[in-house]
Amino acid sequence: MPTPYPKLLDAFKTRAFSFGDFTLASGKKSSYYVNSKKAIFNSEVVNLLSDAMWDMTKDLSIDAAGGLEVGAISLAAVLAQRFAMQGKPLEGFFVRKQAKSHGSQERVEGVLKPGMRVAVLDDVLTTGGSMLQAIAEIEKVGAIVVAAVCIVDRLEGAREALGKYAFLPIFTIRDFGIEPPPPPV
């Protein structure tokens, strides 16, 4: 089935993909790397991304959206702005990997309160470990995670790891013509 976001797909193919020998955040080795930052800081791409994320989240009845730094920061800002443009309130936030040694020393930055319904955001997911770190902190606050949204799912276990939430990738790695490695035996 073709993607409903062909221009966004082309932009990521052109701007975000590199081939070589890479070690991912999950620790896995890969022959390709998706550096979404090379795409999402472009004005046309951010506009296309805003359309896609709005389509995926507009009916979720969420109060907030965010995730682990660095990947989720720009996504939360883009989505919060898009909600505002549609006349709907949305709090953006991000989760620090470590608490700062000064100030409030909180790991969650932004407004996130108990009972808020949250879409957790990330750019590229492999095993889902980074998103699970963010979810742990979000749930400590007492917020309710309703969806896990990402730009690219590498199809290496994230969907399974995040199975108790609505899993909403804009693309899978297959949309880029790449087959994921076979599962370990």
Image (tube, grey):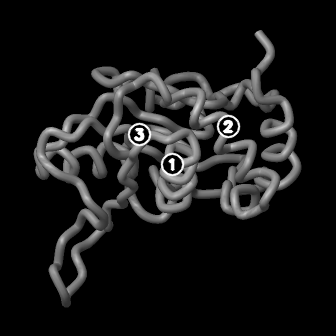
The image's mark for residue 10 is none
Q: Earlier in the sequence, mark 1 or mark 3?
A: 1
Q: Amino acid at mark 3?
A: Gly
Kindly identify the amino acid type of the residue bearing the numbered disc 2. Asp
Which residue is labeled 1 in the image?
84
158 shown above or below 136? above
> Residue 22: x percent and y percent?
65, 57
The residue that disc 3 covers is: 128
Q: Nearer the viewer, residue 83 or 108?
A: 83
Q: Are marks 1 and 3 in contact (CB under 8 Å)?
A: no
Instruction: Please name the amino acid that badge 1 sits on.
Output: Ala
The percent position of residue 155, horizontal first and vertical second, equals 56, 28
Along the line of sight, which residue is nearer the eye, 178 or 184?
178
Cβ–Cβ under 8 Å for marks 1 and 2:
no
| Distance (Cα) linking label 1 and label 3 | 29 Å
> Judging from the image, what secondary structure is the residue with disc 1 in?
helix
- 64 versus 173 height, above or below: below
Q: Which residue is mark 2?
A: 51
The CA distance from mark 1 to mark 2 is 13 Å
Q: Which quarter of the rendered picture does the N terminus lie within?
A: top right
Q: Is residue 48 visible?
A: yes
Q: Camera-side residue: 183 or 93?
A: 93
